[in-house]
Image (cartoon, rainbow, N blue to C red):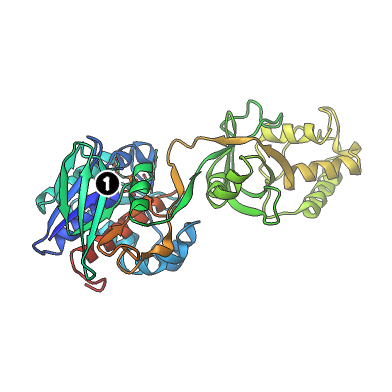
Amino acid sequence: MHIVIVGCGPAGIFAAIRVAETGSQNRVTVLEATHEPLDKVRISGGGRCNVTHNCFDPVELVKHYPRGHKELRGPFSFFQPRDIVEFFLRHGVKLKSEPDGRMFPITDSSQTIIDCLLSVAKSLGVEIRLGKRVKTITVTSDGNSSRFIIGLYTDESIAADRVMIASGSSPQGYRLAESVGHTIVPCVPSLFTFKAKDERLNDLSGISFSRVRLQLDTGGNKKLSQTGPLLITHWGLSGPAVLKLSAWGARTLNECRYKAKLTVNFLPEHDMESVYNEFLLRKKRHPRKRVVSQPLFDIPKRYWTRATAAAGIIDTLLWANISKVALTALAQQLTTATFLVTGKGIFKEEFVTAGGVSLKEVDFRTMQSRICPGLYFGGEVLDIDGVTGGFNFQSSWTTGWIAGGSMGGTSLKN
Ligand SMILES: Cc1cc2nc3c(=O)[nH]c(=O)nc-3n(C[C@H](O)[C@H](O)[C@H](O)COP(=O)(O)OP(=O)(O)OC[C@H]3O[C@@H](n4cnc5c(N)ncnc54)[C@H](O)[C@@H]3O)c2cc1C
């Protein structure tokens, strides 16, 4: 049997390895449009490749996927982060965890991952053909089984018994899927930073908060919220809390053209009232101290100065003389500060597309198309995306592994 995989990204190569590992007599060819296999792996995680996340419970793991959480539940019980860690270890690459759960090769170099995958594929006899961009997929069916003719831009045609589309977020891959009858859920960007022009943020680039609660209001009924670290940038706001919010709100934010109201609680363990009460204590204990001079609650000093200014508190004001109105305004600045999001910025470390092949049309026990027997999918071409932290590669490893196993004729339990 000839199995052809379109795209040599993590999903494609992993599927090819899995087919070949099953030990069957299948011939496996991977067609890659560019001359750089695994190019996204190379640039991923700032060149270090955040391979996966040390979340080993499938129930917890799926919570990191704004799209695909329901469908990935089954696949993750068969192939999850522990399995990819073991795969790389088996092939001589040790991964390490960072305190936030992200896992990288101990070499801190994505090249280690690329070299490993390419050498395993080669040793198993997988043929990787570079510079082979697929233009068309033609299906012929005799009722029981399908055969495929793959048309390349070089005018070459390749016959295949099974085909997998693992073309990532390439528009051409979506067109190939559409050409055989699949529905494409419209694509929008995910994992981006928020642009926000605001006096409170000016010249504070680099200042971070270890834990804030964000609430995003895009004008509809549903408000999205996230808790986590926040970073002030040249253009606005970033950090894990913003990136998670951008992923969960990818579609809604796109609909409102990335204009929204963001409410920040810089003290997520507190509310307005408890902060106000802390202020009253401070007023009683340190009446002769200037309000501006010493931040409360570990708020970075430079941001505290901005928050007090935004609350209308002048530099020389003492705690003894602060009015109830000013106390309320300052408590508001710390617990319900609002910022206008004016656009989306770029997060250089990771980027994915929400949208792709409709998940209803794929059987996640095999990754086979429900529309075109013999056709399989894996990776980002599907309407699946995760938050930042290694979750996007993990869904590619898992769906690639399942597709490879099924194409090679191995059931999930083997
Ligand atoms: C800058 C950046 C950093 C990232 N860092 C991380 C990270 O650290 N951790 C993480 O989990 N995720 C990361 N991601 C996301 C991750 O790279 C993707 O989720 C993942 O690569 C998807 O894998 P894939 O195999 O589905 O697609 P891809 O990696 O996109 O591979 C698809 C391949 O198919 C080829 N192709 C497309 N069309 C055709 C065609 N018609 N014919 C032949 N070949 C074709 C493409 O050239 C490509 O090589 C990052 C993304 C970016 C952009």
Q: Quadrant of residue 313?
A: top right
Quadrant where the C terminus sits is bottom left
Q: Quadrant of residue 309?
A: top right
**Rendered residue at 45%/68% (across/down):** 59
Identified by mark 1, the residue type is: Thr
Q: Position of residue 19 (x, y in %)?
A: 18, 60
User: Taking the image as drawn, is residue 193 in sight?
Assistant: yes
Question: On the picture, is 128 further left or further right than 138?
Answer: left
Q: Position of residue 229 (x, y in %)?
A: 56, 46
Q: How many marks?
A: 1
Question: On the picture, is 262 further left or further right than 367?
Answer: right
Q: Quadrant of residue 23?
A: bottom left
Image height check: is 23 above or below 287?
Answer: below
Question: On the picture, is 384 further left or further right than 126?
Answer: right
Of residues 318 and 110, the one drawn nearer to the viewer in this rendering: 110
Quadrant where the N terminus sits is bottom left
Q: Which residue occupies the extreme bottom position in the image?
A: 413
Q: Position of residue 219 (x, y in %)?
A: 71, 48
Of residues 304 and 368, the one drawn nearer to the viewer in this rendering: 368
Q: Position of residue 87 (x, y in %)?
A: 23, 57
Q: Name the quarter showing ligand 1.
A: top left
User: Taking the image as drawn, is residue 210 in sight?
Assistant: no
Q: Which residue is mark 1?
A: 136
Of residues 321 and 159, the one drawn nearer to the viewer in this rendering: 159
**Rendered residue at 10%/51% (across/down):** 123
**Rendered residue at 81%/45% (across/down):** 282
What element does badge 1 sit on? Answer: strand
Q: Residues within 10 Å of mark 1 (few under 14, many from 20)?
A: many
**Rendered residue at 63%/54% (across/down):** 224
